[in-house]
Image (cartoon, grey):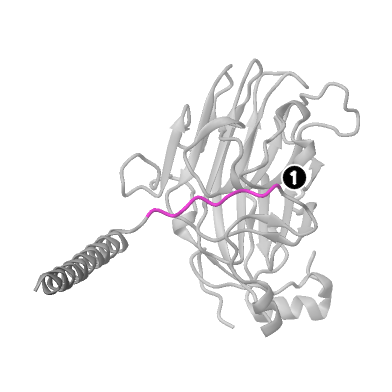
């Protein structure tokens, strides 16, 4: 199989092999990888790790230096909100200052069924341990550009939220160490409990020491066959480690990707260096095709979400025209029938007098 150069072509997706401090994956040809497997000399390329999945970079949903697709014009693929700023080496959602809020949203809805989002980020600031905040969120939601209290975005969202929380708000909890990564799926009926760090509604999570590091930090969100997987590379070893793995997650297509951050009395720099979305090509059996039909509201198997009433979709211009047209036709028809019946009644009345 030919391997095309660059991120824009199809490629075999093997376990990450890294080169240099830039943390870029080394891409080898199929023959080279096969030789390494046979000789057993390839680090991290054992038979159990040769997970073959074709993937394709979707540039309309991706962002990297020099950030040419970011702006306020209608032709821009990404839109800034609040205090977010474009710098030469990163996009800063919030600076290390109190009471700041910023966001970055993709303009293009995503209709992929299986995908993987790789986030290259950096959190740093002057605050000491437990004197910094508040973190940032990565979104795949129905609504975009909606500011609010959940890491700078709206509460009661519809979709998926992944939170990198750097400050513990719940004073009594002793079970987890912050910073902490968690995930939440909502159909619009759930509220994020900020005072309890989102614990009542989280799908899972893990500790992630991501502040003030001298090496690159990455987070990957993978959604394949309704399985949500979140992995981290934050230790400078260029290796993914598991954080969250939840089956039975049902996410509609046509939602928007975004990321947001907020600071309060405590602060940090929250920087996004790149966002790369890959379409994953996954084979499905006919039985899986039946099970994996499109859904209209987010949900998680074996997790009861409060029901919400779906708002009626606004009528299109054609539908509205047809409704008005046929209503007028029915009214005219009823008027004609009424006139005919009235005339017959009058004729019968006259005959009675003769």
Magenta span contains residue 313: yes
Picture residue at 55% right of the left edge, 52% below the top: 310
Give the left or right position of residue 318, taking residue 248 as reference. Answer: left
Q: Which residues are magenta?
A: 306-314
Picture residue at 51% right of the left edge, 38% below the top: 90
Observer able to see residue 243: yes
Q: Position of residue 60 (x, y in %)?
A: 44, 57
Image quadrant assignment for residue 277: bottom right
Observer able to see residue 214: no
Residue projecting furthest to the front: 354
Magenta span contains residue 285: no
Q: Position of residue 88 (x, y in %)?
A: 45, 36
Q: Position of residue 9 (x, y in %)?
A: 50, 70
Image quadrant assignment for residue 284: bottom right
Tell me the SS state at disc 1.
Answer: loop
**Residue that carries the numbered disc 1 in the rendered image:** 236
Q: Is 346 or 108 nearer to us in this picture? A: 346
Picture residue at 61% right of the left edge, 32% below the top: 151
């Amino acid at each position: 199989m030919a391997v095309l150069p660059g991120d824009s072509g199809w490629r075999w997706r093997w376990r990450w092999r890294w080169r240099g401090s830039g943390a870029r994956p080394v891409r080898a040809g199929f023959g080279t990888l096969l030789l390494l497997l046979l000789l057993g000399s390839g680090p991290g390329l054992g038979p159990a790790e040769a997970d073959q999945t074709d993937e394709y970079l979707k540039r309309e949903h991706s962002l990297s230096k020099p950030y040419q697709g970011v702006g306020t014009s209608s032709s821009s693929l990404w839109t800034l909100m609040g205090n977010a700023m474009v710098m030469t080496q990163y996009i800063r959602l919030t600076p290390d200052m109190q009471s700041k809020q910023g966001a970055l949203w993709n303009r293009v809805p995503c209709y992929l069924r299986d995908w993987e989002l790789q986030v290259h980020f950096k959190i740093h600031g002057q605050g000491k341990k437990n004197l910094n905040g508040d973190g940032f969120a990565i979104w795949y939601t129905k609504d975009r550009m909606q500011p609010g209290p959940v890491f700078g975005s709206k509460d009661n969202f519809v979709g998926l939220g992944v939170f990198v929380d750097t400050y513990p708000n719940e004073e009594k909890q002793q079970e987890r160490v912050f910073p902490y990564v968690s995930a939440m799926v909502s159909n619009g009926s759930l509220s994020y409990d900020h005072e309890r760090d989102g614990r009542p509604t989280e799908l899972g999570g893990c500790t992630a020491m991501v502040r003030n590091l001298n090496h690159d930090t990455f987070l990957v969100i993978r959604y394949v066959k309704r399985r949500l997987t979140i992995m981290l590379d934050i230790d400078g070893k260029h290796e993914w480690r598991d954080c969250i793995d939840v089956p039975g997650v049902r996410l509609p297509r046509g939602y928007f990707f975004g990321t947001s951050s907020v600071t309060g009395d405590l602060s940090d720099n929250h920087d996004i260096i790149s966002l790369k979305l890959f379409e994953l090509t996954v084979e499905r059996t006919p039985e899986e095709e039946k099970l994996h039909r499109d859904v209209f509201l987010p949900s998680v198997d074996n997790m009861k979400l409060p029901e919400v009433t779906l708002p009626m979709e606004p009528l299109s211009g054609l539908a509205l025209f047809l409704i008005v047209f046929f209503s007028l036709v029915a009214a005219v028809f009823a008027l004609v029938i009424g006139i005919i019946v009235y005339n017959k009644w009058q004729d019968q009345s006259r005959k009675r007098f003769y």
